Amino acid sequence: MCERIYTNRKREAFMENERIWLSTPTMHGEEQVFIKEAFDTNWVAPLGKNVTEFENEMAHFVGVKAAAAMTAGTHALHLAVKLAGIKTDDIVICSDLTFAATVNPVSYENGTQVFVDSERDTWNMNPCALKIALEKYKDRVKAVVLVHLYGTPSKIDEIKALCDEYGVILIEDAAESLSATYKGKQTGSFGKYGAISFNGNKIITTSGGGMFLSDDEDAVQRVRFFSTQARESFPWYQHEEIGYNYRMSNIVAGIGRGQLLHIEEHRKLKENIYLRYKEGFKDLPVTMNPYEKCSVPNFWLSCMLINEDAMDNVNPEKIRLALEKENIEARPIWKPMHMQPVYKDNDFITNDDNVGEDIFRRGLCLPSDIKMTKAQQQKVIDIIKGLF
């Protein structure tokens, strides 16, 4: 018994001193059951039972009619853009404050991105700025790509109404927001097409991978067709259109099936992390990433925003470096797309003094790993409080 207590204390001491990560995979064990089944039945190549069941289970969870498992969330977005009929010089209006994977697929189809600024209530696409963009480019806009940043649902009703009014396709990038809900409905189910990601740092992971979502079952079939090299139904290999090698493997899908069993557990742990930061920072000149009362985020990443009047003494980079010195990972907010050199010539539309730039300047993503102990999180909080 004494040896066991000593061993546990040694492990706890190690846990408190090891690197504190932003967000890493958390495995449970069920993943290996599904993987073993794939090995035992020799279905280790692309497609198989795990892929089919993972698609069905994910479609049921999100609340859409069908899903197609991809090798990356980016590939799901690419095929959504392709199905939207984007051609050379067509306009696609995109969230500005996001990761490049949201908007790059527009370039794959030779379309042109127009970036729309954020609003302060959710940090997501500003509906007022979107209306300006839709009016400005109404003869050329084919689609809107909407992001739910850091797992926080956007103002979906307003944005969807504008897409309907102007007759454009809504593509929902729910890569970061799986399990988040807006008025009780899962993100990823509002657009004509949706995409989610299972990258290693997401709320559940398959190590990599993603999923295309839609109520249009014919569209999902087209995605499966394009993602298997657009092979036609002949006994020989015949190709009448350009295809891609985008289909998820049966092994990877097995990981996803095991992870999906724990998604609500992961979401709750992420929420607890967010609430502990909020309580820990209550006396500091900072706020946490906001959300509307009608939504329930998945709290994928907890982010802080420093008040303007405190920026002279403490800024996000000072905090990041102080944490890194203690072997703690933090990360800047996504740099807005209109500030990226590769998109310097693209139009950017705002109606509220460059909200995304301001969030990028004053914000920081904090460690949000669900394996982080309360003591480790308190260490993060204490370091930040000490800087103020």
Image (cartoon, rainbow, N blue to C red):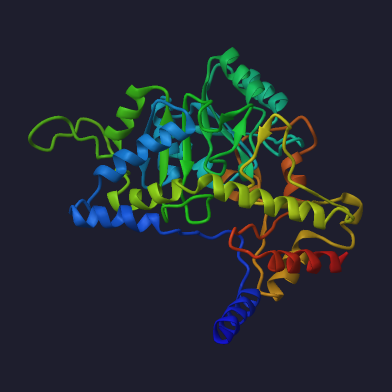
Q: Count the marks.
A: 0
Percent across and percent down for residue 201 are 53, 55
Vertical order, 7 against 225 (above or below): below
* The quadrant where residue 296 appears: top right
**What is the x, y in percent for residue 231?**
19, 35
Extreme left residue here? 235
Q: Between residues 150 and 309, which one lies in front from this camera angle?
A: 150
Q: Position of residue 115 (x, y in %)?
A: 62, 35
Q: Residue furthest front?
A: 1
Question: Residue placed at 64% from the left, 46% from the top?
Answer: 299
Q: Is residue 109 visible?
A: no
Q: Residue at x 65, y 32 (%)?
A: 154
User: Could you tell whether 357 is left or right of 172 in the image?
Assistant: right
Q: Toward the viewer: 259 or 316?
A: 259
Q: Where is residue 28 shown, x and y percent of the image?
A: 45, 58
341 up-or-down from 18: above or below: above
Depth check: give the residue in front, 129 or 377: 377
Left or right of 237? Residue 257 is right
Q: Residue at x 34, y 48 (%)?
A: 253
Is any part of residue 376 visible from this angle? yes
